[in-house]
Amino acid sequence: MKHLHRRSDAISLAGTPRSSLPLTQIIDQACQEAEAYKDAGVDGLIVENMHDLPYTVCPGPEVTAAMTVISAAVRQTCPHLALGAQILCAANQQAIAVALAAGLDFIRAEGFVFSHVADEGIINACAGNLLRYRKQVGAENIQIFADIKKKHSAHALTADVSVAETASAAELFLADGVVLTGTATGSPADPQELKEVKCAVKIPVLIGSGVTLENVRNYLDANALIIASPYSFVPLQTSISDVKNCQVPSNTQGVIVMETFLPKLTGLFLTGVQGVFTVSPVHP
């Protein structure tokens, strides 16, 4: 089964508490790993500032600038893969700007509909402003996959709104897909919630946390499964052979692409062959 890997740099960006390496070295590392994944035949990559801890609701312009040059370099390394970006925390307009400048295909957005209290603070809904910004800058080709009832957050403010209703609101507000998670990184999503959300919306549904070899069968109705080591699958040393074996290195996250997800991004479809998905061009 092929993967759409979510590229989460193991190094913090400039201006964040753990930053230590120059941007040029971070770019080189990102491109080296992207090259390995590309050679292994993955379906795509996502660039994310995952290690910029602790996150802030308003990351500085230096983060946007760094994410842009890293993403552009990864795009040059992988010109034919589906590529996306996420900028933590909830810097969704910045992610659109990065995707537009770097030629990416999609973003993952936090706080798309309804407000919630995250560990970074209160996150308010952004769909109206985000889609207007996307229109204004001419980035309508960049898709938005929106988290619903996001992990590492309290949802007491919307306790009377079900996860299915939240997904429906995201669809109404023109999200291109929704991301369903557990309560924290590594916590599995509720399979019953997946069923409810799948029944509630017609847009793609992604599982955003806690997928393991033991529970993956619970999520086969999803359009894509975001996976993250060391919590999901088996932590491994980064190597091309690990990727070729469809296993995720310990410092990365990824997405297993299901049949109905990839065509909207790339014009490709997945053909199942004895349980292994291969990518083929769409025929007219």
Image: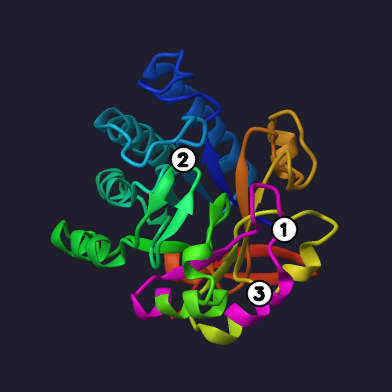
Identify which residue is drawn at 45% across, 42% down. 120
272 and 246: which is toward the camera: 246
Horizontal and vertical percent position of residue 10: 56, 27
Disc nearer the start of the sequence (2/3): 2
What residue is pinned by disc 1?
Answer: 188
Asked if disc 1 and disc 2 are in contact, CB closer than 8 Å, the reply is no
Residue sitting at the far left: 136
Mark 2 element type: strand
What residue is pinned by disc 3?
Answer: 193
Residue sitting at the far right: 214
Is residue 80 in view from this perspective? no
What residue is pinned by disc 2?
Answer: 48
The stretch of residues the image draws in magenta is: 170-197
Mark 3 element type: helix
26 and 28: which is toward the camera: 26
The picture quadrant where one finds residue 210 is bottom right
Residue sitting at the far bottom: 199
48 and 15: which is toward the camera: 15
Identify which residue is drawn at 47% across, 24% down. 12
Disc nearer the start of the sequence (3/1): 1
Residue type (three-letter) at the residue carrying disc 1? Pro
Horizontal and vertical percent position of residue 3: 63, 53
How many numbered discs sit on the rendered protein? 3
Horizontal and vertical percent position of residue 165: 50, 80
Horizontal and vertical percent position of residue 160: 52, 77
Residue type (three-letter) at the residue carrying disc 3? Glu
